[in-house]
């Protein structure tokens, strides 16, 4: 059964197509959505989004955001979204390195929100790297 | 009276200037188009976000979040968005005037853009941070700003956060605008913003009535709200900076267009003067030759 998938970032509409099924990284773990799903809104974690089209799985690395599902469509709102061709490994690795260094310098007890932000950056970078390396 | 060579020199130099301003006008026009496209591209995101927020609001009895907390006491944090470069008419001055008039002098200031950072620093106001933002505006960089502002607000030091920026109304009209970012007024949450100048009218308005679906919120509405509100703030700041950018480029385009027009007028006047002088010189010369011929007869 086909379902409409839209991926939107503040900068542009990244993806819009009819697909067969979708798997998303939510806060409660990976969630699969088929058409006819009950209307659902849930936050997303940085990770991989997979969808099936013509029997083939295609992946995107996404950042934090949320997902809105209805009977016939899924809308993903996220701050970044990249397919493996778009990911520049060096840039992502450098960003991750910076975040890790900053994390090592931060006092974990004094500034918990800073630690969380850095951890989110690292998670995002990791998700992108994982996707990129799989296609090498 | 100026001689011919002086006038020729002046014409040449003014023509050079007009070429430069003409080029700047073209560049600004192209950049303005880009900034407008960027603002319009964000509409899809804004529409979905608003639709979900409307639903969330309907599903929750009384929202509770640090971003919604109204405090009586506290300082005022002000984010001022200006431009990095000059030659863009009076938009920076207008923002500064509005800030001076409507916002407290003893508030803490955060700036984006070099021009007003310098002004605010010069006035000895309390400048706590400055963020450089490249053009076109990347969302990732804006997140850093909104994160900083939200953290400062949550720390309890401030009871109000305002943003001063230039709102894009049309290519010819840009207005300074001050908007309250935090605390979020729940009654205004997900309502239409009064500064959505760029994208206005180009994308159909979201019909909230259609969006009244019964959603399940996982894990629960509160958790969803917790992740949604920071994203809402990120997006608001992003949108305001994009508005300011579109305003900057269109103001620069208009300023450069009038500079080019002025230069061309000046050249025209100088050319008239130049030709008059040249003609006078020719007449003079002819007169001299004829007189000499007459004398020899």
Image (cartoon, coloured by chain):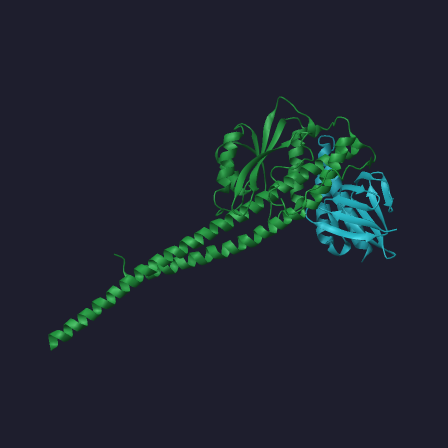
Chain colours: A cyan, B green
Residue at (84%, 44%) from the top-left corner? A71
Q: Position of residue B123 (x, y in %)?
A: 48, 33
Residue at (83%, 40%) from the top-left corner? A39
Q: Is residue B212 left or right of residue B70?
A: right
Residue at (38%, 55%) from the top-left corner? B265
The tally of labels here is: 0
Q: Position of residue B46 (x, y in %)?
A: 69, 42
With respect to residue B285, does B24 lie above or below? above
Q: Is residue B273 left or right of residue B173?
A: left
Q: Which quadrant of the structure image shows residue B111? A: top right
Q: Position of residue B254 (x, y in %)?
A: 49, 49
What is the quadrant of the C terminus of chain B in the image?
Answer: bottom left
Q: Between A90 and B71, which is closer to the camera in this rendering?
A: B71
With respect to residue B154, does A119 lie above or below? below
What is the quadrant of the N terminus of chain B in the image?
Answer: bottom left
Q: Position of residue B97 (x, y in %)?
A: 49, 35
Q: Is residue B87 left or right of residue B157?
A: left
With respect to residue A115, does B279 lie above or below? below
Residue at the far top in the pictured view: B72
């Amino acid at each position: 059964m086909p379902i409409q998938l839209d991926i939107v970032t503040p900068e542009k509409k990244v993806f819009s197509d009819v697909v067969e099924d979708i798997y998303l990284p939510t806060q409660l773990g990976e969630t699969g959505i088929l058409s006819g799903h009950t209307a659902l809104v849930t936050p997303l974690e940085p990770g991989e989004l997979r969808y099936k089209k013509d029997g083939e799985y295609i992946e995107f690395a996404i950042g934090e955001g949320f997902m809105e599902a209805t009977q016939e469509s899924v809308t993903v709102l996220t701050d970044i979204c990249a397919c493996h061709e778009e990911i520049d490994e060096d840039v992502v690795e450098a960003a991750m390195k910076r975040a890790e260094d900053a994390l090592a310098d931060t006092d974990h007890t004094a500034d918990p929100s800073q630690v969380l932000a850095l951890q989110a950056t690292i998670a995002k970078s990791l998700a992108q790297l994982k996707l990129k390396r799989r296609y090498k | 009276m100026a001689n011919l060579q002086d006038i020729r020199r002046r014409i040449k130099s003014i023509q050079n200037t007009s070429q430069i301003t003409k080029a700047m006008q073209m560049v600004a026009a192209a950049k303005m188009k880009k900034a407008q496209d960027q603002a319009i591209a964000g509409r899809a995101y804004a529409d979905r976000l608003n639709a979900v927020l409307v639903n969330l609001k309907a599903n929750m009895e009384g929202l509770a979040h640090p971003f919604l907390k109204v405090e009586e006491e506290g300082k005022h944090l002000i984010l001022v968005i200006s431009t990095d470069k000059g030659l863009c008419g009076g938009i920076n001055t207008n923002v500064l005037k509005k800030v001076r008039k409507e916002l407290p002098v003893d508030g803490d200031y955060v700036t984006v853009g070099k021009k007003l950072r310098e002004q605010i620093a010069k006035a000895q106001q309390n400048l706590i941070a400055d963020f450089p933002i490249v053009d076109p505006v990347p969302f990732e960089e804006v997140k850093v700003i909104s994160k900083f502002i939200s953290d400062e607000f949550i720390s309890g030091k401030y009871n109000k956060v305002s943003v001063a920026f230039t709102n894009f109304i049309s290519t010819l009209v840009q207005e300074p605008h001050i908007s309250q970012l935090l605390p979020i007024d729940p009654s205004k949450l997900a309502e239409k913003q009064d500064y959505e100048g760029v994208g206005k009218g180009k994308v159909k308005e979201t019909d909230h009535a259609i969006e009244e679906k019964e959603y399940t919120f996982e894990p629960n509405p509160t958790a969803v709200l917790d992740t949604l509100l920071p994203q809402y703030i990120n997006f608001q700041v992003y949108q305001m900076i994009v508005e300011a950018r579109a305003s900057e480029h269109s103001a620069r385009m208009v300023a450069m267009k009038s500079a080019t027009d002025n230069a061309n007028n000046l050249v025209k006047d100088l050319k008239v003067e130049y030709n008059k002088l040249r003609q006078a010189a020719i007449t003079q010369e002819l007169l001299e030759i004829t007189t000499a011929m007459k004398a020899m007869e």
